[in-house]
Image (tube, rainbow, N blue to C red):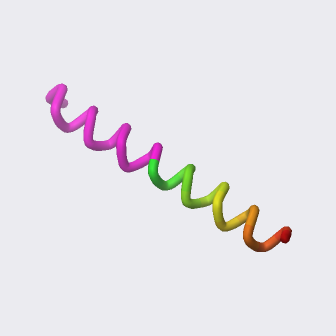
């Protein structure tokens, strides 16, 4: 696996986790 691919996967996973936390905050409020 290339470094570029790993970086893209990391960024996508990071954004997904942020979106998940954000939606959890919206649901709880």
- Please report the bounds of the magenta region as a residue range: 1-14
Q: Give the prevailing secondary structure in the magenta stretch.
A: helix
Of residues 6 and 21, the one drawn nearer to the viewer in this rendering = 21
- Say whether residue 6 is left or right of residue 17: left
Q: Quadrant of residue 22?
A: bottom right
Q: Quadrant of residue 2?
A: top left
Q: Residue furthest right?
A: 28
Please give the name of the residue rendered at 32% of the width and 42% of the height, measured from the top-left corner.
9
Residue 23 rendering spot, x and y as whole percentages: 66, 67
Q: Quadrant of residue 8?
A: top left
Is residue 9 within the magenta segment?
A: yes
Residue 26 rendering spot, x and y as whole percentages: 73, 70
Q: How many marks?
A: 0
- Say whether residue 16 is left or right of residue 1: right
Dividing the image into 4 quarters, which one contains the N terminus?
top left
- Say whether residue 6 is left or right of residue 25: left
Dividing the image into 4 quarters, which one contains the C terminus?
bottom right
Residue 19 rendering spot, x and y as whole percentages: 55, 59
Residue 21 rendering spot, x and y as whole percentages: 66, 55
Above or below, 23 relative to 10:
below
Please give the name of the residue rendered at 78% of the width and 73% of the height, measured from the top-left corner.
27
Q: Residue furthest front?
A: 29
Q: Residue furthest top?
A: 3
Please give the name of the residue rendered at 49% of the width and 55% of the height, measured from the top-left corner.
16
């Amino acid at each position: 696996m290339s470094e570029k691919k790993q970086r893209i996967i990391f960024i996508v996973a990071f954004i997904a986790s942020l979106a998940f936390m954000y939606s959890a905050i919206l649901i709880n409020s």
